[in-house]
Image (cartoon, rainbow, N blue to C red):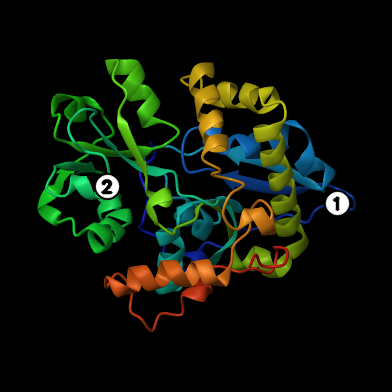
Amino acid sequence: MKAIPVAVALAALLAACSPAKKEAAPNALTPIRFATDWRAEAEHGGFYEALAEGEYARRGLDVKIVQGGPGVNVPQLLAAGSVDLGVGSNSFIVMNLAQQGVPVKAVAAVFQKDPQVLIAHPDTGVKTLADLKGHPILLGDASVTAFWVWLKAKYRFTDDQVRKYTFNNGPFLADKRAAQQGYVTSEPYTIEKQAGLKPVVFLLADNGYPGYATMILAPDTLIAKNPAAVKAFIEATAKGWQDYLNGDPKPADALILKDNPEMTQDVLDQARAKLKSYAIVDGGDAKAGGIGAMTDARWQTFFDMAAGQGVYPKTLDYKRGYTLQFLGAPAK
């Protein structure tokens, strides 16, 4: 389960550390350093599939995937010019970019549903999210300023329920009343494998949580100077995800296992199956707009929710955090 980074670099950092790019030779591939938000995993499968199958190269790009990990802040890497494109884990990151005036935008949303879940013990009377009111809930620090805001607004959860989550399942397993955050593609499987119990899992997106996830972030400088490269990356990525989910995932899995030797094939297989069964990638706006689709209406719904809880001023120009210019016709 990845931590959700919410701090973003200041715009001044981008101005001070803008990347010095080498001029590409005629007909040469455009180099793109693409930062993910965690170690290589099935949640990045479509990016690796596009790389393995040559989809990026076919569109004139020489892509290098720079995997993330604990403490990696993708918006900060973009602002410092250390990478050219990167993954935005959740919609709060995009709103933070807009609020802090960082010239980086979301250009596509690979995950139509944020994979965040709350996990509870079986046979404790917890059958809905609302039943968790009053229960201790293990959350990472960043989650308290992200999806916890929505949970409090919708279910009237209170801050005294929050317990520290250190990305270790032990405290959850030790307390049957407790619930824990996680990703639908990760923690439920590891808990079942570790403890032999099948937890109760609530996907926040299927309960009304409106955020996108795994967005492609691009600096304004790249959008202005080489929009064709941004569009090519999005199109190749969409093809990669289509093939990873519906075709042969072995090319991507081989690269993932090479980049992240701690990953195992069984974890990849179950995560890919859940990405499909929960329509994480091809549900939502992607049904009409294709993989990566975003809409103004969905962003407004998210912003209204967050601003309504005081996270952002209602006067914020949140549209500075994303652009639809590289996507097809907006989904209705």
Q: Quadrant of residue 123?
A: top left
Quadrant for the N terminus, please: top left
Instruction: Point out the image quarter for the C terminus.
Output: bottom right
Circle 1 residue? 25
Residue 326: in sight, yes or no?
A: yes
Give the side of residue 214 with respect to residue 1, left or right.
right
Task: List the single residue furthest toward the bottom.
Answer: 315
Give residue 226's quadrant in the image.
bottom right
Depicted 171 relative to depicted 315: above or below = above
- Describe the element under mark 2 as helix, strand or loop: helix
In the rendered image, residue 204, in percent from the top left (x then y), is placed at: 37, 49
- Compared to residue 258, the image places residue 330 above or below, namely below
Q: How many marks?
A: 2
Does residue 41 appear in this view? no
- Residue 185 in percent (x, y) is at 45, 33
Residue found at the very far right of the displayed protein = 27
User: Looking at the image, which is closer to me, 59 or 154?
Assistant: 154
Question: Is label 2 in contact with label 1 (beta carbons under 8 Å)?
Answer: no
In percent of the image, x 78 and y 56: which residue is there?
A: 23
Which numbered disc, 2 or 1, marks the residue closer to the eye? 2
How many other residues sit within 10 Å of disc 2, few (<14), some (14-19) or many (≥20)?
some
Q: Which one is nearer the viewer's eye here, 128 or 202?
A: 128
Give, as a three-letter code, the residue at label 2.
Leu
Callout 1 secondary element: loop
Query: Upstream in the sequence, badge 2 or badge 1?
Result: 1
Counting from the top left corner in percent of width and height, residue 115 is at: 44, 44
Disc 1 residue type (three-letter): Ala
- Residue, disc 2: 129
